[in-house]
Amino acid sequence: MRKTRPNHLAGFGSSLWLLVVGLPLYAMLVATFQSRADYAANGPLALPRHFTLDNYVNDLDSGFAQYFLNTVIVTAAVVGLVLLLVPPLAYAIVRNDGKATGRVFRLFLLGLAVPSQAVIVPMFYLINEAGLYDNLLGVILPTAAFAMPVCVLILTGVMRDITPELYEAMTVDGASPWTVFHRLVLPLSKSGLSTIVVFSSLQAWNGFLFPLVLTQSSENKVITMGLYDFQTEHGVDIPGLLAAVVLSMLPILLVYLFARRALVQGLMGVGGK
């Protein structure tokens, strides 16, 4: 049998990349388990001499739990709106070759070229005139609107991979368009649906610009805005801040771990082909 020579250069590169990625994570996690005084005395890479969970407890007691709940509400609402509107729209675009449908699809594609920073001022006036300023709904609606163009593009690509023979077979059997959509298209588009769920949840969970401009009171703060509470005129509570960052990372990390396979398949097409 032919012996394979070890690739030392690839191993060195992989180890170096692991060090680059792992060292910041190690520094972040270690800091959350030590007091502010120990962190200042020992440095960011030292192991905690007195292991403590006070940073996590203090974060939850200081209002971070409310920020976490607000972020969950915003994320769930954005994902719900995307799942309610995008699949029927993508199905109509794929199955309808009319000019009106094509114009709607091009309109959504145009949304890919419009950054949220460019329209934040008119968005502020629109939300204010609608009476939604300093309201979670005022954050949910524009976040969902800016997530929809990418979601429509992903889901239409997935639905186009469904062979026309399957549509024709169900139509011959007397199935209505709703039945075809419910029993054929949605089951075969699970990977694409998982992809848009992960994408829209990331957009909502990590959103910063809309909460910054469209909210003001502490009752409507989300996680990205709540992190500013750890910076005062006397300094920054680094262990408390990093503990809050860890708490904010966990939900999205869990979503990605459970949906990563469907996410990759959705980006590649139905069945990962």
Image: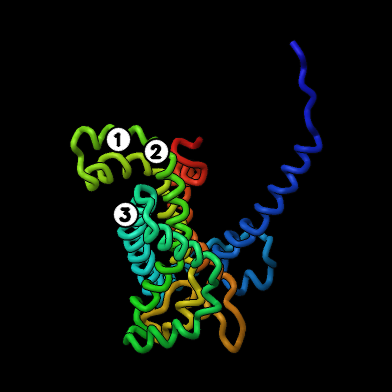
Horizontal placement of 89 versus 236: left or right? left
Asked if one can make out residue 166 in the rendered structure from this viewpoint, the answer is yes
Task: Please identify the quarter of the rendering in which residue 60 is found.
Answer: bottom left
Asked if one can make out residue 258 in the rendered structure from this viewpoint, the answer is no
Q: What residue is pinned by disc 3? A: 88
Give the x, y percent position of residue 79. Answer: 36, 60
Give the secondary structure at mark 3.
helix
Its colouring scheme is: rainbow
> How far apart are the two marked residues, 2 and 1, measured between alpha carbons?
11 Å
Closer to the observer: label 2 or label 1?
1
Q: Earlier in the sequence, mark 2 or mark 3?
A: 3
Q: Residue at x 75, y 37 (%)?
A: 11
Give the secondary structure at mark 1.
helix
Q: Residue at x 42, y 43 (%)?
A: 160
The amino acid on which the numbered mark 2 sits, given as a three-letter code, is Ile
The amino acid on which the numbered mark 1 sits, given as a three-letter code, is Glu
Q: Quadrant of the N terminus?
A: top right
The amino acid on which the numbered mark 3 sits, given as a three-letter code, is Pro
Task: Please identify the quarter of the rendering in which residue 67 is found.
Answer: bottom left
Closer to the observer: label 3 or label 1?
1
Per the rendering, the mark at residue 74 is none
For this orientation, the residue located farthest to the top is 1
Q: Residues within 10 Å of mark 1 (few under 14, many from 20)?
A: few
Q: What residue is pinned by disc 1? A: 168
> How far apart are the two marked residues, 2 and 3, measured between alpha carbons?
15 Å
